[in-house]
Image (spheres, rainbow, N blue to C red):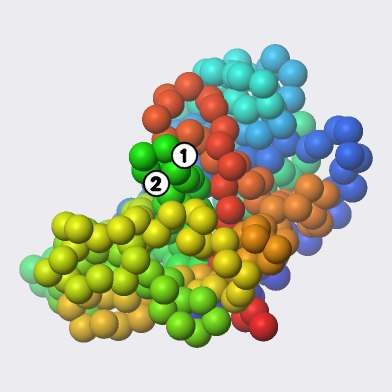
Amino acid sequence: MRFSHLYKTGLMLFFLLATTISAQNYAPVFDFEKVMDTYFDDSGLISFQDGKIIFAPGNRLNAQVAVVDQENKVLARFPFHPRYKAHEGVYARALVQAPADITLTKPGIYNIVYIVDGRPATRLPFRLVQTSAGDDPFNPRKEFAFDGYWRTFAFIIMDDWKGEEWPEVYYWLGGLDLPKGQNDDKQIVTLFRDGKMVAHSKTRNGFYKKGHFEKVHSHLYHIHPENKSYNARPFLLKDWLVDGVYELRVNRLSDKAALRSFDFRVVNGKIEGHPRSRLGYQPQTDYIAPRVQKRSSTYPELVEAIWIEDRQLK
């Protein structure tokens, strides 16, 4: 399922403010992984708590986060505290001034927009879908789901296995990916090179549950029978770097239904980065920095991330 129309919607007033970035003076951008991990629930609630900023400005922050509807009406704005919670090099963590909650009850397309020094820095478009009318006498409550880039984006970072780099894939799954009436399931990831399967995850891993999309992660192994998974060989970075067109598929384990498809190329022994991760990408609000927070660190520390997407490649 594709969400390219979300990519094109709204924010024309904001885009009029956008400027071209010079090579030496990069505009602030919010860590896209952290943006995707914003708190959403089935009442229509969005709750903002903190943000992580790459190319963070100065020692003090003048920033806010806004929720905008498809008519470009700003429904709410929440300022960040001017003092960073932590700041290291170009990367910083900042807290939103509480309370910073908004509940949406009108289905439609919206944008979350992060603004620094009066200019839009990063946005997240999404669709609000009503999943329950509240007409059940035993549960008289309207329920909603947030849909969007959680279905189309993933990223790869490097783990370590006996001193060798081992790609680890992160993506989002949630209640919209479950069979009707089911509260949880498992999933399996397979990697195809030029249409031929070359690796897959272990089936005993990969649990996900009802609710908003949550981040999950998988390592891949050389092809092996399920009863030999304990002895499976990791599919290391050197195994990924064979030139070709790749597709990562995520399937539900219970019925093999397709959940995700992420596409990328390996050219001259290197995984191609996403076009939106190139410095200077325009519009600036859609730039996705090729960095995320280091997994083993609570202090601001960046590691390289390769963002991949559900897109047609040849």
Identified at 31% across, 71% down, the residue is 223
Nearer to me, 128 or 175 = 175
Q: CA distance from mark 2 to mark 1?
A: 7 Å
Identified at 74% across, 25% down, the residue is 57
Quarter assignment of residue 225? bottom left
Q: Position of residue 50 (x, y in %)?
A: 49, 32
Q: Residue furthest left?
A: 138
Nearer to me, 246 or 277 = 246
Residue 169 appears in view: yes
Answer with mark 2 or mark 1, whichever residue precedes in sequence.
Answer: 2
Secondary structure beneath dot 1 equals loop
Nearer to me, 89 or 37 = 89
Q: Which residue is mark 1?
A: 48
Residue 3 appears in view: no
Say which quadrant the C terminus sits in. bottom right
Q: Is residue 119 left or right of residue 73?
A: right
Q: Position of residue 168 (x, y in %)?
A: 42, 52
Q: Which residue is mark 2?
A: 39
Q: Is residue 137 left or right of residue 210?
A: left
Identified at 48% across, 34% down, the residue is 294
- Callouts 2 and 1 close, C-beta under 8 Å: yes
